[in-house]
Amino acid sequence: MSANADAQCGLIGFFDVLGYKSIIENNPIGEVISIVHTIQKTVDEHQKYLDEWADYCGHVLFSDSILVYAPFSEPRNEHKNTGLIAEFCAGLLNDLFWAGLPTRGAWAFGDFYIDLQPGKICLAGMPIIEAYELCNCIDLAGCVVAPSAETVLVGKQILDSSSEQPLGFIKYLVPLKGQQKQKLFMLNHYTFDRHNNRHPEISRQTVFEKFGAHNKRISVGVLSKANNTLEFLEASKGDRQSTCQTGKTY
């Protein structure tokens, strides 16, 4: 059998928790373990919800990094699975933020291979690399859509490139490390929320509390991420009434 038979094509999301090194440096190991369990529990809760609706989506969790994948195996499932993985990812970002664990991430699209077996994990594919690299470039907590994913989602009429705030997304000037801002689509946390926008109003004080939670040190680099995150969340408020749940709008 050709190895290509095991490959899949679809969306990849890569996420990491900001300030994880600072958490390890400034907390005893018992507290670090508790925080890691919080990340695991949050991911598991959202995966259970996803399993109720999605035809096939999954995740891999290692340390503070989360890899999410959603194969586009059948055309009839593409719109629904995109809506569901968006809810899944936005839910993770929201819940981890309120747990004092602001998280950044990126989506990419293409052929990938994931083999999960007891005692080993095998990952391969350009969208995994693209999502990882872009995730590590963005200077805020949030999820950006890489060009590979944007091109496909627009072509399938899942994402409306003509709108500044298509349902569930926002076109935003994203601050990148050491570079000028680049206009990219981002997940809008307010619209993809299966909890019906339960989140309180986000203030500057709230953002700084979350970035400094768990004894994390707010260095100059962290300060820019916190300020950039506040600006992004403020920009996202305009479309917060247009909720999208269980992919129904797809």
Image: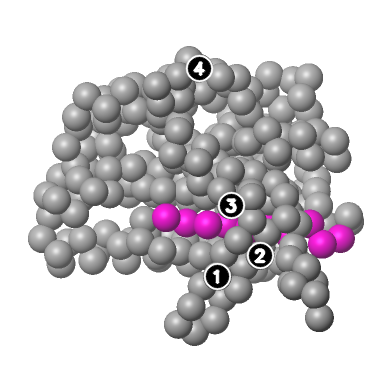
Crowding around mark 2 (Cα neighbors within 10 Å: few <14, some 14 to 19, many 20+) is: some
Q: Residue at x 48, y 78 (%)?
A: 120
Return the disc, 3 or 2, that comes first in the chain's sequence.
2
Q: Residue at x 46, y 25 (%)?
A: 176
Classify residue 202 by image quadrant: top left
User: Comparing marks 4 and 2, which lies closer to the viewer?
Assistant: 2
User: Residue 122: which disc?
Assistant: 1
Q: What residue is pinned by disc 4? A: 181
Q: What residue is pinned by disc 2? A: 113
User: Comparing marks 1 and 4, which lies closer to the viewer?
Assistant: 1
The residue type indicated by label 4 comes to Lys
Q: Residue at x 43, y 60 (%)?
A: 42
Query: Label 4's element?
Result: loop
Does the stretch in magenta take in 66?
A: yes
Question: Magenta-highlighted stretch: main secondary structure?
Answer: strand
Classify residue 215 by image quadrant: top left
Return the disc, 1 or 4, that comes first in the chain's sequence.
1
47 w.r.t. 220: above or below: below
Instruction: Tell which of 15 and 94 is nearer to you.
Output: 15
Note whether residue 47 is visible: no
Q: Are marks 2 and 1 in contact (CB under 8 Å)?
A: yes
Instruction: Tell which of 167 and 226 is nearer to you.
Output: 226
Q: Residue at x 48, y 36 (%)?
A: 142
User: Residue 45: which disc?
Assistant: none
Specify the farthest residue to the front. 2
User: In the image, which residues are magenta?
Assistant: 65-74
Return the disc, 3 or 1, that comes first in the chain's sequence.
1
